[in-house]
Amino acid sequence: MIRMKKTHLSLLIVGLGSLLIVGCGDDSNGGSGLVDPTDPNALSQVIVIPGAQRVEGQPPTSSGTPDAPVISGGTDLETGNGEQTVIEVGYESPTGYVDCYVQVIGADDYFLISAPSTETTGLIQIPVNIPENVSSGVFDFYTCIAGANGGVSNPIRTSVDVTYTGNPGGGGDVICASDDPSIGGSIIPCPSGGSLDFCIDQGNGSCYYTIGGNRIQCGNCASGSPDIADCVQRAVELCI
């Protein structure tokens, strides 16, 4: 019995690992290369703010001085890949403003927009281009401005919800091996009864196993290699 269980375990690990590799493919050989919005550095490298300069490091923090600009905004935004969204910043400043700073929160760089204005109050609109290869997810922008007197405003935080509108490989939003063996072979029977199925969400690139109503997440098959060993181990534990 022990030997049989070990044999089942070995076959399951080999079978699940192979299914996951086939289903996800190899990004080094022509994968979809989608960028996960929850990876701040990867996202910051691909988004475009027209006219902005990319700067390594962190943007300035509020100077806290009485004559520093005061800004408002931070309205949540919804957009899609391949689209442009706009950050709107209302401001009041005794000396106008000289620079605007925007950062994908968590990134190791930021965007510097130099567009001086002597107006003491107004609305700044910052267009942001989201490339076609950005998958579904939510991220946040940090934004502040600097006045002509050197004072730095309070920061605002703007949440952006991106919806990936493409369907890599065609088909519906979610496809599973039980319906389409081309994504990862056939379903795998479990020694304890039931079977393991492998699925890919084409909307956001996530992939996972299912068994008896349970879901084992395996990472994002579209934007990078999942943790195969950990995913397979958790799937095996539910299967045996």
Image: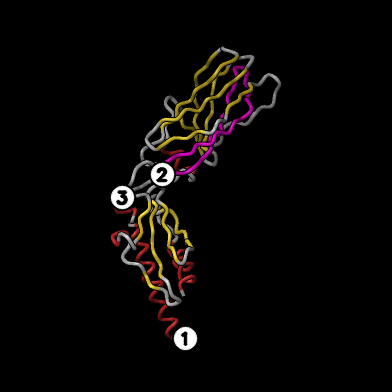
x, y (%) of residue 196? 41, 67
Chosen colour scheme: secondary structure
Residue 148 in the figure: left or right of residue 233 = right
Q: Mark 1 or mark 3: which is in front?
A: 3
The residue pinned by badge 2 equals: 135
**Dot 2 alpha-carbon crowd within 10 angstroms: few under 14, some 14 to 19, many 20 or more:** many
The residue pinned by badge 3 equals: 171
Question: Mark 2 or mark 1, which has the lower sequence index?
Answer: 1
What residue range appears in magenta? 135-164
Asked whether 184 falls inside the magenta stretch, the response is no
The residue pinned by badge 1 equals: 2
Q: Is residue 169 above or below residue 23?
A: above
x, y (%) of residue 144? 58, 27
Does the CB distance between marks 2 and 1 fall below 8 Å? no
Q: Looking at numbered disc 1 in the image, what kind of residue is underneath it?
A: Ile
**Alpha carbons under labels 1 and 3: distance apart:** 43 Å
Q: Looking at numbered disc 2 in the image, what kind of residue is underneath it?
A: Ser
Residue under the point 49% across and 63% down: 214
Residue 193 in the figure: left or right of residue 72 = left
